[in-house]
Image (tube, rainbow, N blue to C red):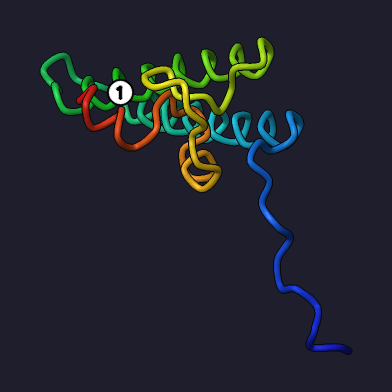
Amino acid sequence: MSLDLPRTEPRTAHPAADEVRQRLEHARTTRLAQLKALDDTGQSPGDHLMSNQIDAIKRVLTEIDEAFARVDDGTYGTCLGCSKAVPPERLEILPHTRYCVACQRRAA
């Protein structure tokens, strides 16, 4: 076994659409499982914390659906704020992100 082999594959600026869809589907499945777990616990009418968690998960699910649409129209990975490429590392961590870090800070 040679030690000269690279330990990781080089990253590409834009991951393949199938890989992106797989990441997004994983994110969607995870959020749906969280939503189901919260629903299964039973929510009391006055439980604002749980209600806020459910709303946040639903917002992320909407963002994931919007990311699927960007994959389909070819704009996935392009920041909606500055039109520059979102770094691949950011997309790995947050595949449904719409913004680069700088634009996200400005939007917040």
Front residue of this view, candidates 15 and 24: 15
Quadrant for the C terminus, please: top left
> In the figure, is residue 44 to the left or right of 11?
left
Front residue of this view, candidates 34 and 9: 9
Give the x, y percent position of residue 104: 29, 29
Q: Residue placed farthest to the right in the image? A: 1
Indicate the quadrant where residue 29 lies: top right
Indicate the quadrant where residue 102 lies: top left
Q: Residue at x 49, y 34 (%)?
A: 86
Number of residues whose C-alpha sits closer than 10 Å to that of mark 1, classed few (under 14), some (14–19) or many (20 or more): some
**Relative to 61, residue 104 above or below:** below
Please tell me whether mark 1 sits on a helix, a strand or a loop: helix
Quadrant for the N terminus, please: bottom right
Type of amino acid at the residue the image marks with label 1: Ala
Q: Residue at x 66, y 33 (%)?
A: 20
Give the x, y percent position of residue 33: 50, 32
Q: Residue at x 54, y 15 (%)?
A: 65
Q: Residue at x 55, y 28 (%)?
A: 77
> In the figure, is residue 16 to the left or right of 54?
right
Q: How many marks?
A: 1
Q: Which residue is mark 1?
A: 56
> In the figure, is residue 9 to the left or right of 100?
right
Give the x, y percent position of residue 16: 74, 35
